[in-house]
Image (cartoon, rainbow, N blue to C red):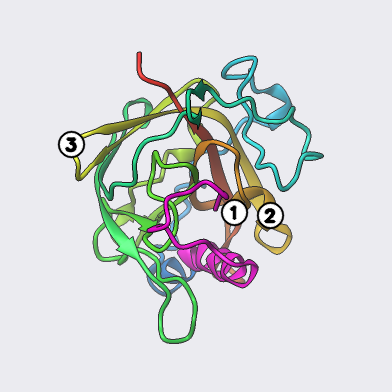
Amino acid sequence: MENAEPPAERRISAGRLMLIAVAAVLLGVLVIRNHLTTDSGPPPQPVPAAAQPSASPSASASPSASPSAGRPPATPVESPSGPFAMKSSKPVRIKIPKIKVDAPFTPLHLNSSGVLNVPPAADRNLAGWYADGVTPGALGNAIVLGHVDTSLGSAVFWGLGSLKAGDKVEISRTDGSVAKFVVDSVESFPKDDFPDARVYGKTPDAQLRLITCGGVYDKKAKDYTDNVVVFAHLLPPA
């Protein structure tokens, strides 16, 4: 994702970014097949971006690929070797205290058709990460997907839209470390007008994207109308 990223981490081409975007939409497709068409209402929706406080004066949710997205350029925390980041290590568990998320990870890969798989719908408490991209905490933009609901009810990222700037996300990793992120913003985008470059593009520091379905469930189309995206950046050691 970044020129200085570890060689072991394969960069995502522009074509792959589009495939990941398809996967974000497919988070709703699995629900289409099994969705409980109740009138229980939509999942929590993000506060409009303009009304959200900034997590910190120097924080930015926007990747360097789209500096005109309405936020100042990212100001990464500098270390002697550059922006602060952790060594590459696979994630094993995600915790979001604000919405009581405590879930294991499953790696996600491109399937035989070249489209990124999404987490199995049979397990409601499971998050997926793009295993051929950046690991959470490493330099670049780590991509994490999760269902908002399944046929069995609400799923791991049901409450994602209720997060706000300043909320924390913790990701435990196989090397025993914990990557701690702070939320910069939580936004909702129509699936037919999704800002691929801003969500999946390169970042100058260690950032995280959490993605699920959002908006309202369109019973006629049998799909959610939007995708909810959490933009977050890695916190340096205390």
Q: Is residue 10 magenta?
A: yes
Task: Name the residue at 40% across, 71% down.
Answer: 117
Secondary element type, mark 2 = helix
Residue 163 appears anywhere in the view? no
Position in image of residue 40 (x %, y %): 45, 48
Residue that sits furthest to the front in the current view:
80
* Local crowd size for mark 1, using a 10 Å CA cut-off: few (<14), some (14–19), many (≥20): many
* Local crowd size for mark 3, using a 10 Å CA cut-off: few (<14), some (14–19), many (≥20): few
Report if the CB atoms under discs 1 and 2 are less than 8 Å apart.
Answer: yes
Q: From the viewer's perspective, tell me whether residue 122 is left or right of residue 98.
A: left
- Please name the residue that numbered disc 2 is placed on: 197
In this view, the residue in front, 40 or 96, is: 96
Q: In this rendering, is residue 144 above or below 123?
A: above
Q: Quote the CA–CA distance across marks 3 and 1.
A: 27 Å
In this view, the residue in front, 155 or 126, is: 126
Q: Earlier in the sequence, mark 3 or mark 1?
A: 3
Q: Amino acid at mark 1?
A: Tyr
Q: From the viewer's perspective, tell me whether residue 191 is left or right of residue 89.
A: right
* Local crowd size for mark 2, using a 10 Å CA cut-off: few (<14), some (14–19), many (≥20): some
- Please name the residue that numbered disc 3 is placed on: 176
Q: From the viewer's perspective, tell me whether residue 204 is left or right of residue 130.
A: right
Image: magenta residue range: 1-28
Q: In this rendering, is residue 106 above or below 181?
A: below
Task: Name the residue at 50% across, 67% down.
Answer: 23
Q: Amino acid at mark 3?
A: Gly
